[in-house]
């Protein structure tokens, strides 16, 4: 029982730490970059001026979406690695 409590405490601490860790996703060769924290909340969007073409807004929208998807996937991988290191690879329902 004590081991379970220790694991719970380590999991809670890891969840807190994930909130301050960030990953960056990009698209268009880095023309669009999105920063997401370990809780998968977007923190920042950076768009290079060269990516802005008023006659092709659709391309910019696609790059922003692609960068968000990339950053979210990286954040999920980060969270999965952190939790897996604590649980020893056990799949705990509702954790991730």
Image (cartoon, rainbow, N blue to C red):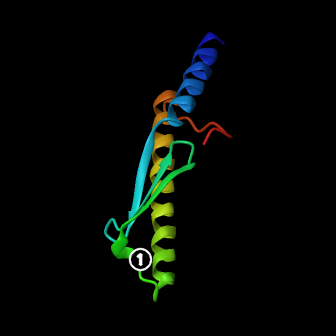
Residue closest to the eye, 70 or 58: 58
Q: List x then y, in percent, for residue 1.
A: 66, 12
Residue 27 in the image: above or below residue 22: below
4 to the left or right of 21: right
Q: Residue furthest left?
A: 29
Q: List x then y, in percent, for residue 85.
A: 45, 31
Task: Give the residue drawn at x 55%, y 35%.
Answer: 90
Q: List x then y, in percent, for residue 75.
A: 48, 48
Task: Give the residue drawn at x 45%, y 64%.
Answer: 67
Q: Residue furthest top?
A: 2
- Looking at the rendering, which quadrant does residue 13 occupy? top right
Quadrant in which the C terminus is drawn: top right
Task: Give the residue drawn at x 46%, y 89%.
Answer: 55
SS at mark 1 in the image: loop
Residue closest to the eye, 23 or 48: 48
- Characterize the local packing of mark 1: few (<14), some (14-19) or many (20 or more) Cα atoms within 10 angstroms: some
Q: List x then y, in percent, for residue 53.
A: 41, 82
Residue 35 in the image: above or below residue 29: above
**Residue ID for mark 1:** 52
Residue closest to the eye, 2 or 50: 50
């Amino acid at each position: 029982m004590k081991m379970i409590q220790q694991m719970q405490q380590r999991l809670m601490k890891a969840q807190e730490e994930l909130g301050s860790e960030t990953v960056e996703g990009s698209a268009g060769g880095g023309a669009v970059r999105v920063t997401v924290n370990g809780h998968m909340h977007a923190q920042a969007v950076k768009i290079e001026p060269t990516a802005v073409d008023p006659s092709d807004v659709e391309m910019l929208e696609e790059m922003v979406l692609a960068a968000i998807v990339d950053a979210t996937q990286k954040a999920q991988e980060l969270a999965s690695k952190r939790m897996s290191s604590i649980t020893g690879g056990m799949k705990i329902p509702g954790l991730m």
